[in-house]
Amino acid sequence: MARRPRNGYQPVARTSRDGVEEEIGLEDLESASRRGPAPVEAARVRRRRPRHCFPLLNLRGTISSIFCILVGLIVFTFLLVPSYTNLPPHYTALRDAVQQSTAPGRGNLRNSTVFIAASLYDRNGALASGPWGQSLLNLIDMIGPDKVFLSIYENDSGQAGQHALQQLSDRATCNKSIVYEEHFNFTGFPTVTLPDGSEHVRRVAFLAEVRNRALRPLEEHPELQFDRLLFLNDVYFNALDALQLLFSTNTQNGVPDYRAACAVDFINPFKFYDTFASRDLEGYGTGLPFYPWFAAAGQAQSRQDVLHGKDAVRVRSCWGGMVAFDARFFQHPLQSSISAIDYDQEGYMDRDVPVRFRAEEDLFWESSECCLIHADIQRPPSPAISKQEDTGIYMNPFIRVAYHPRSFSWLGTTRRVEKLYSVVHGIASRIAGLPVYNPRRAEVAGEEVQERVWVPDGSGYGGTFLMVNRTASYDGFCGRWDLQVLTSREESGEGGWKSVPVPA
């Protein structure tokens, strides 16, 4: 039988003050009332901290602890283990050679010849007359004007763009071909007919053509031979970085060894831009567009190369706003240091050489011209091995460019903490369903396959998707379901193209 309280009173009444519950005996209340109107708080109380305060205190403490840990990790990573900040020794040696002299050619230690190509749309002349143009001139000086051929093709940029390009041409002291066309002539240019009957120019076909026009001097002057070819986009870049990309990437006994080496381009200080052209070593597309860029798909070798801080991240394709190529693949074998036997041994006799930019032919299947060019020059992968071979195509995360000056100015800072993104990137990319499934990614060139393609009907503009049997190509990893066509460009220079919905 439960023990009754003293004086026969039933247990306590409860009140609360300042968030603290108080337990007050009834005899205390009676005693307090006999003493007059003194407040109840004068009564003898037994205080007890409320139960709900404990989780609040624990939550605040947990948040504070997490915040302190994050700040500590950021400071530790920023100061002691930054990503892609401490240059390899041969990068440092080249940098010192450039900084300790002002002589032309001071950065070209092996006297290599370089063909520099760019296709521009420069509506206000801000590229040619601004930091882009100055960085280009600095690069030419570091390589040596007598070792450089500069080729720029520009169209539809108006008087300001034309004037700025001419001024840049006057300042460039190397051999050069500077071509300006007031309007691109689409007469006879191939078009595609959509299911609604309208005709359009494919965007990628147009981009491939203007890039090829920047390469025309290679055909017009076959007597000129080059060791390296550098292709530049309309990006902010450092001339010394471009030099490192050309001469320091994946060096073997002091000699750069690559078929292509790409920079990494950014649309803001954190966001990687060129996902359309980039594929990892197994042909997978990228994950979410921040470090380490590549998703944990397949064996994730490209992702591991990035996390290990390699300067030559093995990939199937890339672009990154600035790409260095082995120039042999862009010159005719009979006029180049690469022989027909070299091509035959490496599996290139069935491909057109010299290579040029191109576009897809299937309707509603789209690939970047910047991916297809890498498909045309890389070492063909062997289907007999379990682990993907080195293709000779590399991404170099030490070399970074951006499409806005403010973003470019922040790249040296944001890279110092990017190692902390990797876990979040892996989880978030998986949740987002990246990389996107590509039904042609794993096709082996030369094998018979079934592919879903758009087949036009007899009307000339209708059609449907059908499964057809055909021989697989070596560029299926580049594609995705899409169709991009040209549209009118806005006065600001934005736009100029759109994606056409893929029919059901």
Image: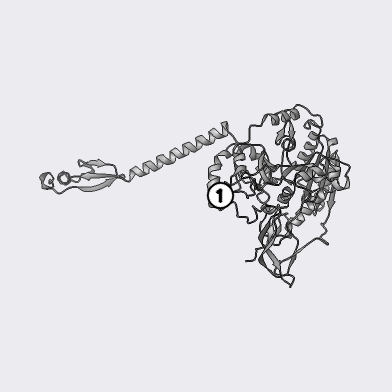
Farthest residue in the top direction?
100
Whether residue 406 appears in this view of the structure is no
Residue at 61 percent across and 42 percent down: it is 301
The amino acid pointed to by label 1 is Ser
Q: Quick one: 283 or 422, which is closer to the camera?
A: 283
**How far across and down, in percent of the image, does residue 374 sit?**
72, 47
Using the rendered view, name the quadrant where residue 406 is placed.
Answer: top right
- In the rendered view, tell whether residue 254 sits above or below residue 450: above
**How far across and down, in percent of the image, does residue 167 sit?**
84, 44
Using the rendered view, name the quadrant where residue 230 is placed.
Answer: top right
Whether residue 488 appears in this view of the structure is yes
Left or right, residue 229 beside residue 408: right
Left or right, residue 263 beside residue 26: right
Residue at 60 percent across and 55 percent down: it is 437
Farthest residue in the front direction?
384
What residue sits right under mark 1 in the picture?
Answer: 429
Q: Quick one: 76 or 370, which is closer to the camera?
A: 370
Tell me which colouring the rendered structure shows.
one colour
Farthest residue in the left direction?
7
Query: How many numbered markers are drawn?
Result: 1
**How far across and down, in percent of the image, does residue 452 sit?**
66, 62
Farthest residue in the bottom direction?
459
Q: Quick one: 492 or 457, which is closer to the camera?
A: 457
Left or right, residue 417 beside residue 144: left
Q: Secondary structure at mark 1?
A: helix
- In the rendered view, tell whether residue 380 sits above or below residue 103: below
**How far across and down, in percent of the image, does residue 5 sit?**
13, 45
Using the rendered view, name the quadrant where residue 365 is placed.
Answer: bottom right
| Circle 1 crowding by C-alpha within 10 Å: few under 14, some 14–19, many from 20 | many
Which quarter of the image is occupied by the C terminus? Answer: bottom right
